[in-house]
Amino acid sequence: MQVNVISLFPDMFSALTTMGVTGRAHEQGKWSLSAWNPRNYTHDVHKTVDDRPYGGGPGMLMLAQPLVDSINDIKQHGGTGPVILLSPAGKPFTQVKAQELSQLPRVTFVCGRYEGIDQRFIDHYVDEEVSLGDFVLSGGEVAALAVLDATIRLLPGVLNDQQSALQDSFHGELSGLLDCEHYTRPEVFEGESVPPVLLSGHHANIAQWRRERSLALTAARRPDLIQQAKDNGLLSKKDLLFLERLSSTSIAN
Ligand code: SAM
């Protein structure tokens, strides 16, 4: 996968290319990154990339021209793929979106700064806008890093154990639910034991315990995800019976 980022702070992306799972995958050539700094596409001595908003108001806006020139340069170096702007006004980023992005051979992320970007660039050069959540970051880089991290770990061969992606929250076997709790050594820590079923070696019972914990955790913390899984027909009869029992016992308590 070829990733382009248009950013005034390209060094921030070394966190992805040099560290952890994404860094290893980068080293192995499973994905590559080209950073394009709009400041390199300015024509004045001050390398100006921003200006005051028409109509007044606080802050500065990114100029359209250096961004357009960045896009045109990417087009001359293999193409952009879909152009995605990180923006609080975008569609909320999800695991489904990460899966969709992980299928692309190339993609370009545009990272805003200041109070945002001249709308004419967005209207004519951006294919979609993606938000990390209902909060305001000082720049799109941190959002792009998060989106890329979630996407790259889904590329074939990136995770050592492909099963672990399937077992993550929202993913595959979990049918849009939260992941259950996990435990590692020692068996007893600060007086608290690991749930006995996990030590039983009985695979079916362990799988059932994990499924029920996922259902219970999701019902308690994200009932919207339970509803979504129901609407999408992702819950089995056994799941639905467990949820019924769960709500009747919590009402009784
Ligand atoms: N004036 C903008 C607003 O109120 O929507 C906020 C601009 S913000 C300070 C600067 C840049 O950070 C944005 O252009 C965008 O690229 C990025 N950004 C901020 N919050 C974000 C979020 N929740 N998701 C994705 N990108 C975000």
Image (tube, rainbow, N blue to C red):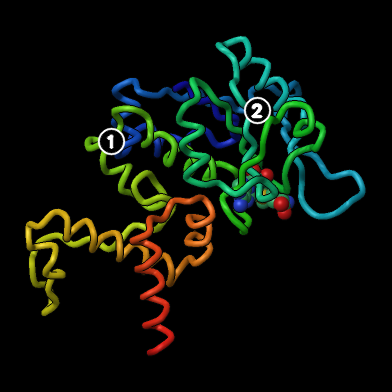
- Quadrant where the C terminus sits is bottom left
Quadrant of the rendered image containing residue 119: top right
What residue is disc 1 on? 159
* 114 versus 47 height, above or below: below
Report the side of 58 relative to 22 (left or right): right
User: Which residue appears at 60% of the width and 30% of the height?
Assistant: 6
Q: Give the x, y percent position of residue 125.
A: 73, 26
Residue at the front extreme of this rendering: 237
The label on residue 38 is: 2
The label on residue 1 is: none
Quadrant of the rendered image containing residue 213: bottom left
Dots 2, 1 in contact, CB < 8 A: no
User: Which residue appears at 7% of the width and 57% of the height?
Assistant: 201
Label 2 CB-ligand 1 distance < 8 A: no
What amino acid does circle 2 point to?
Pro
Report the side of 68 relative to 105 (left or right): right
- Quadrant where the N terminus sits is top left
User: Which residue appears at 66% of the width and 22% of the height?
Assistant: 70
Q: Give the x, y percent position of residue 186.
A: 8, 65
* 143 versus 110 height, above or below: below
Q: Give the x, y percent position of residue 217.
A: 37, 67
Report the side of 238 relative to 108 (left or right): left
Q: Give the x, y percent position of residue 46.
A: 72, 30
